[in-house]
Structure formats: structure tokens, C-alpha cells
Image: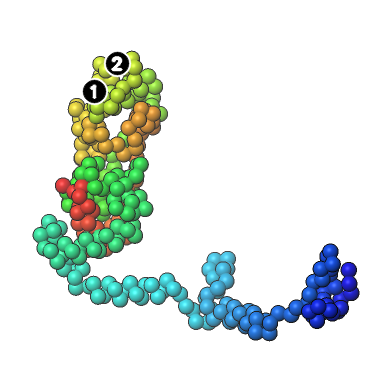
Amino acid sequence: MTEHGDVDKVSGTATTGHEWDGIKELNTPLPRWWVTTFYATILWAIGYWIVYPAWPMLWSYSSGLLHYSSRADVAVELASLEKIRGDKMAALGAAPLANIEKDPALLALARARGKAVFGDNCAPCHGSGGAGAKGYPNLNDDDWLWGGSLDQIMQTIEFGARSGHAKAHENAMLAFGRTGILKTPEIVTVANYVRSLSGLPTSPGYDAAAGRKIFADNCVSCHGEAGNGNLELGAPDLTDRIWLYGSDEATVVETITNGRAGVMPAWVGRLDPSTIKALAVYVHSLGGGK
């Protein structure tokens, strides 16, 4: 160990006094420009804290001398955009829903507006292209729980399903096992019968006659005698091989045991009527609308 202030004979630079295995640590000062820049950034940060919103507080945040808000800037820009769109969106809002797809200009506007709104509000559940996911319907396949016409799509978007709105679709799949309506062996039997309706294989020893009777006694009131479903009740078609939650036996047993009651939010009040109309047209145009 050498004393602090020694000068290295080779480089002519003062040392820190530290030495390891004959290697001395040089006390090379930082470049003046670097030090100046460093202190300037500190001063800049302090000034930024004072002028702009910066510090989180218990219920809010420090607003800064300029009271700047990026959210406010976005609101102004969106308001300007809506002003530009005003006349066109007014025309879209005034047009009967059935006539929009017959007018190329209105249809193009509705698709463009609907696609943007879909990406902002619907894609997290239904996917960016509307292909859906487990528990979230595919909007491209022409298989609809509550109907795929323009009017039906718009009603679903406006009021949702089990959303709490007075006009929402409300019917739900009963929990036959949890409520004790059916016992586990009966649920397994009817689950196999339901799978057989769409041509899926059944378990060895499955009693088709028993499955048919359990289905007739408990399921036909919603799904129909042939299992073709009922749009008025939101009861899915069990014969088309399109399954919202999955078609394997365990998943079907789970559905019958505990029921299903997915929620579609109501967008009325969140989106303006013209935007909802554009969204309905866009969803209808994805390819699955009737």
C-alpha cells in the first residue's frame, strides 16, 4: 500500500494510494466537460420538478408551475379530430343502420371508425382480428349466441350480456351439479351425449339412451330437442363443433356442473350512438355477420 498523493513514475499521474499486486490505482480526474454536464443535468432535473408535474403525493401529484398535462393535450387533439369528423359522423348517426352498408362512403367511414374503436375497446377480449379466445366469442365464424344480424349485433354492443343494464341479455347456463339438480354420474353421461351431438367420440360404456333422457329432461328448454340452440336465450348450438369454452369431456362436465355466465359490458353511455353504430357495422363486416 502506498501513501495518497504519490505520483506514478510511468504516467506522471497522482495515485489514490491503493495498490494490488504491484498495480497502482491512478487518481485520474474526470474531464471538466463531463463534470460540468453532470451538474447541469442535476440542475435541469430540479428545474423540471418545479415546472412540470413530477412528484406523486398521497391523493394526487405535484402539478408544476406550468400545470402541464399530456392527458389534457390528448383530449384537445381528440376534440379537434372529432370536430373534423363532425359532419361525417353526424351523417353516419342519422342514417338508418340497414342503409349504411348500401352507401360506399358511409360504409368506408363506419369500417374505419369501427376498426379503431374495436382496437381500443374490444380487442383485449375478442382479439385484434375478432378471432376470440377461450370464453370470448369468435366474431368471424357466423356462430352467434345472441344473433349476428346488424340489429342484433348493435343491441349486444349497446347493452351487453349480464352487464347489469336493464336491457342486457340475461340468460345464463345453470349450474346443474353445484345446485344438486344432477349427480356426477348423470353429468358425465349427459356430457358425453352433448359431445356426441357434434360427432365427438364418447367414453367407453357410455349409455346413449340415458344421456338422451337426461338431456330431454334438463336441457331441451334452452338448447332445443336437437341441440341446435336458441338465440333468444343465448343458448349455443351444440351440434356445430364450435365451442366457446372447449369440447373435451372434462370441460363439458365443468360447464354442466358449475354453469357459465360470461359478461359482455354495455357500451351505451361509454360510446356515442354514432360510434356504436360504426362498431356494429365493423363487427358485421368481419365475415361472421348474418
**Location of residue 114 in the rendering, given as x and y in whole percent from the top left corner:** 25, 60
Query: Which residue corresponds to mark 2?
Result: 207
Viewer can see residue 223: no
* Picture quadrant where residue 235 is located: top left
Tell me the quarter of the image containing the N terminus: bottom right
Q: Earlier in the sequence, mark 1 or mark 2?
A: 2
Could you say which disc has been placed on residue 38 in the image? Answer: none
Q: Tell me how many marks there are.
A: 2
Q: Does residue 5 sit above or below 283 in this rendering?
A: below
**Location of residue 73 in the rendering, given as x and y in whole percent from the top left corner:** 40, 75
* Residue drawn where x is 28% and y is 27% of the image: 200
Viewer can see residue 19: yes
Q: Does residue 169 sit above or below 87 in this rendering?
A: above
Q: Amino acid at mark 2?
A: Asp
Q: Secondary structure at mark 1?
A: helix
Of circles 1 and 2, the one toward us is 2
Crowding near the residue tagged with mark 2, few <14, some 14–19, many ≥20 C-alpha atoms within 10 Å: some
Query: Which residue corresponds to mark 1?
Result: 216
**For the residues marked 1 and 2, what is the alpha-carbon distance in whole angstroms?**
14 Å
**Location of residue 94 in the rendering, given as x and y in whole percent from the top left corner:** 15, 65
Q: Does residue 226 sit above or below 242 in this rendering?
A: above
**Location of residue 22 in the rendering, given as x and y in whole percent from the top left corner:** 84, 67
Q: Amino acid at mark 1?
A: Ala
Q: Residue furthest front?
A: 10
* Residue drawn where x is 65% and y is 81% of the image: 34
Q: Secondary structure at mark 2?
A: loop
